[in-house]
Image (spheres, coloured by chain):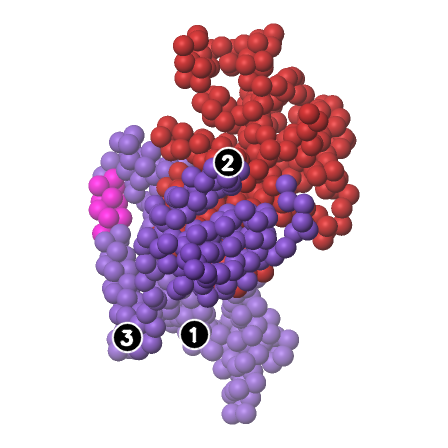
Amino acid sequence: MATAPPLPGSATLTRDTGGSRLTISGDWTLAHYSDLQRRANELAGSIDTGIAIDIHQLGALDTSGAFVIAELLGSSRTQALAQDDALPPARRALLKTVGDAIDTYCTGVKQPREAGFVATLERIGKAMQGFWKQTAKLLAFIGITLQGFLATVWRPRRWRVTSLVSHIEQTGLDAVPILALLSFMVGCVVAFLGATALASYGASLFTVDLIGFAFLREFGVLLTAILLAGRTASAFTAQIGSMKAREEIDAIRTLGLDPVELLVLPRVLALVVALPLLTFLAMIAGIVGGGVVCMAVLKISPSMFLSMFQADISLTQFLVGIAKAPVFAFMIAVIGCMEGFKVSGSAQSVGEHTTSAVVQSIFVVILLDALAALFYMEMDW
Amino acid sequence: MTRETVIEVRGLVNRFGSQTVHENLDLDVYRGEIIGIVGGSGTGKSVLLRTIIGLVRPVAGEVRVFGEDLLALSDERRSQVERRFGVLFQSGALFSSLTVAENVALPLVEHAGLPRVDAQRLAGVKLALAGLPVDAGRKYPAQLSGGMIKRAALARALALDPEILFLDEPTAGLDPISAAAFDSLIVTLRNALGLTVFLVTHDLDTLYSTCDRVAVLSQRRVLAAAPIDEVARTDDAWVQAYFNGPRGRAAARVAHPGKD
């Protein structure tokens, strides 16, 4: 349409006796947006009511150009311009569309984002509030789970045995190889540590006791719990979360079924069964790892190792360690399931809550372990 | 009057495993028209769209957009051509980690090289053009309803003022009022911006109220590509069932009042 070569858009204001005249010419397109916007800001103050507008030298026009024009001229003049028969209909339609869009929607004023000291305090406050809400939710969910358990435990017909067994397999049996290897290696490391540190006192024989105490009291159960917090809590959250995101949980409710009974109980019970068993395995694997290092580095034969073990380490050590396993299992499973239920809508939300489940369950496991250590010490166990 | 062809599909073959979706499919799309692509489920409407925009590599055949074969171009040239497209995906495909306004501003910052402040302002206008209130811009996609996501995705598709707009089921999941508003929005934008619109849809009302031509995909090829009244007279069982079934007749009555 334009015979002249494309020129970047420009707007010039001329004043004569008859009043002022704004001439809009050239290409008003995205490519020149920044320049046009700057020019429009310069002119903004000097557009008065009686101004005549000459838009006939306008080259190309797109939505961004039309936006600058509409903003420069203001609503009523843009609408008047859109009625101007001298313009081709497509131009008028574009101006009218952009003008309408601005009138209808762009009236809200952007509120500035707060920054500085107050905002920092606000964030701290929000975080604290979030923490308390989180704790309350966790306690509530524990309550719901226990209630569901008590409601079904007397009614064997409502036990979900298939689901339970399947979850024991997934969380327990499938974790055996990784857990055994991990504990074996940590056992080796602890033995090396003992051999090195105790050698200076000439007490490297007590490496055996170190391994025994460490694995029976702490490392067996802690390693297992942390591994399962990463492996199983995240899996529970992802499974339940994706069901929540696809409205499957809602479907369960509308069918008159209880999602806690159907989804949470089998998972929690499965972990409560699997985690103590895995803990026992982790203890054995760790002690074997330590024994191997003792044999290789300290020349302590397996029979010597075992007889020392039997003489120095009482059954209490084992009981004290394994007693923590069901508690950790319960907390890991409950947190995993709860985070799954908190998922909303999107796939991104599933990811966020999965991360949150792992962080929370590891945190809770270590916190409870520290409390238990204090308690056991006071009790002289 | 000879019309400029912007999309030229020749002898297209698409095959997934043993299932042939397209076989020797030919299609021309002309500048400035709104072409509706219809077809039963599984006839490869979306696959055709994805082939044209270069997301699916065809087994055989040729796809030329603006006279250039996208698959043969260097990455840089291809990116330049792709800037002339706007694509609205079926479920919106907004980036969930960005706010709606940032979604729209992203191509403006990356391709048009605008400063962030300008890009955000312009994004607000694009959102308004697509019919969203300005405070929707600060929300994240997860906080929007289905209809608002469609509108936000349209705003992103329009961000660079594209020459061709690809719409994959734009009115699916919208209420009739929003769907009608969306239809008229597309026509207005086409008239105002001279867009070419490639529209995959099942919505008969959209077909009647917006499309200049309709292409029917059936039996792995384009069965007919013509103005809708002409297509509706095609002697094919599926076409007859589609356009002259109860819903088709209702939509036609609305489009041509007084004629049944």
Q: CA distance from mark 3 to mark 1?
A: 50 Å
Residue lying farthest to the bottom in this orientation: A201
Which comes sooner in the sequence, label 3 or label 1?
3
Q: Which is more foreground, mark 3 or mark 1?
A: 3
The span shown in magenta is: A143-153
> Against A64, is A124 above or below?
below
B69 sits to left or right of A102: right
- Looking at the rendered structure, the secondary structure element under dot 2 is helix
Residue denoted by label 1: A213
Look at 48% across and 40% down and name the residue there.
A92
Of the pair B5 and A228, the residue shown nearer to us: B5
The picture's colour for chain A is purple
Same chain for mark 2 and mark 3? The answer is yes
Q: Position of residue B51 (x, y in %)?
A: 66, 35
| Residue B251 drawn above or below residue A74 | above
Circle nearer the viewer, 2 or 1: 2
* Mark 1 closeness class: few <14, some 14–19, many ≥20 residues within 10 Å: many
Tag 2 subunit: A
In magenta stretch: residue A147: yes
Three-letter amino acid code at disc 3? Val
A375 relative position to B15: left or right: left
Tell me which secondary structure the magenta stretch mostly adopts: helix
Residue matched to label 2 = A89
The red one among the chains is B
Residue at 22% over, 46% down: A147
Label 3 secondary element = helix
Discs 2, 1: same chain: yes
Badge 3 and badge 1 both on one subunit: yes
Which of discs 2 and 3 lies nearer the camera? The answer is: 2
Residue B219: image location, x then y, percent: 65, 17
Residue with the mark numbered 3: A118
Between residues B43 and A79, which one lies in front from this camera angle?
A79
